Image (cartoon, rainbow, N blue to C red):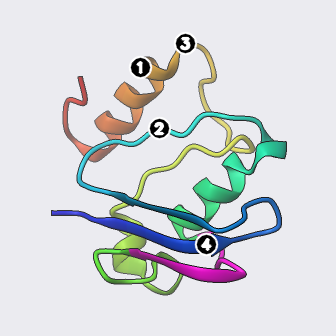
């Protein structure tokens, strides 16, 4: 079972974010100025939080290649098919991971 834990996470745009997310697909939508991209980059292990703790199954994604292999993310700067809606994007990510998301 996968478990993502955020405790007091801070970045340039995020202040004291905490939450716990169990197994499954989680979708965060927003605009860059609201910190959505920061949250996705932190959870995907692209960078470390300035403060706080972020762990996936007890490991820091930014420090663990094994943890990062279990994370799929779509950042605004990534190339790819941008047509469709969120359900379409989730289907594409699920296909990459080898399961049916819907």
For the point 26% across and 55% down, the residue is: 22
Which one is closest to the eye, mark 3 or mark 4? 4
- Badge 2: few (under 14), some or many (20 or more) residues near its Cα, within 10 Å? few
Of callouts 3 and 2, which one flags the residue occurring earlier in the amino acid sequence? 2
Gap in Å between the C-alphas at discs 4 and 1? 28 Å
The x, y position of residue 17, in whole percent, is 59, 63
- The circle on residue 9 is 4
Q: Secondary structure at mark 3?
A: loop
Q: Secondary structure at mark 4?
A: strand
Q: Secondary structure at mark 2?
A: loop
For the point 68% across and 35% down, the residue is: 30
Of callouts 4 and 1, which one flags the residue occurring earlier in the amino acid sequence? 4
Quarter in which the N terminus is drawn: bottom left
Rendered image quadrant of residue 78: top right
Q: Answer whether labels 1 and 2 touch (C-beta < 8 Å).
A: no
Which residue is identified by label 1?
87
Which one is closest to the eye, mark 4 or mark 1? 4
**Extent of the magenta region:** 46-55
Which residue is identified by label 3?
84
Which one is closest to the eye, mark 1 or mark 3? 1
Query: On screen, 23 above or below 55?
Result: above
For the point 72% across and 65% down, the residue is: 15
Gap in Å between the C-alphas at discs 4 and 2? 18 Å
Which residue is identified by label 2?
27
Q: Answer whether labels 1 and 3 touch (C-beta < 8 Å).
A: yes
For the point 45% across and 82% down, the residue is: 60
Q: Answer whether labels 4 and 1 touch (C-beta < 8 Å).
A: no
Q: Along the horizontal axis of the image, is 17 left or right of 91?
A: right
The x, y position of residue 52, in whole percent, is 59, 81
Gap in Å between the C-alphas at discs 3 and 2? 15 Å
């Amino acid at each position: 079972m996968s478990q993502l834990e955020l405790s007091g996470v801070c970045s340039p745009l995020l202040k004291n974010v905490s939450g716990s997310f169990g197994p499954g697909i989680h979708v965060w939508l927003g605009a860059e100025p609201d910190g959505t991209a920061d949250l996705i980059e932190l959870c995907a292990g692209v960078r470390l939080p300035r403060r706080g703790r972020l762990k996936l199954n007890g490991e820091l994604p930014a420090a663990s290649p094994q943890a990062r292999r279990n994370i799929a993310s779509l950042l605004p700067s990534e190339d790819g098919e941008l047509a469709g809606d969120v359900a379409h994007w989730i289907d594409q990510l699920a296909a990459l991971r080898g399961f049916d998301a819907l």
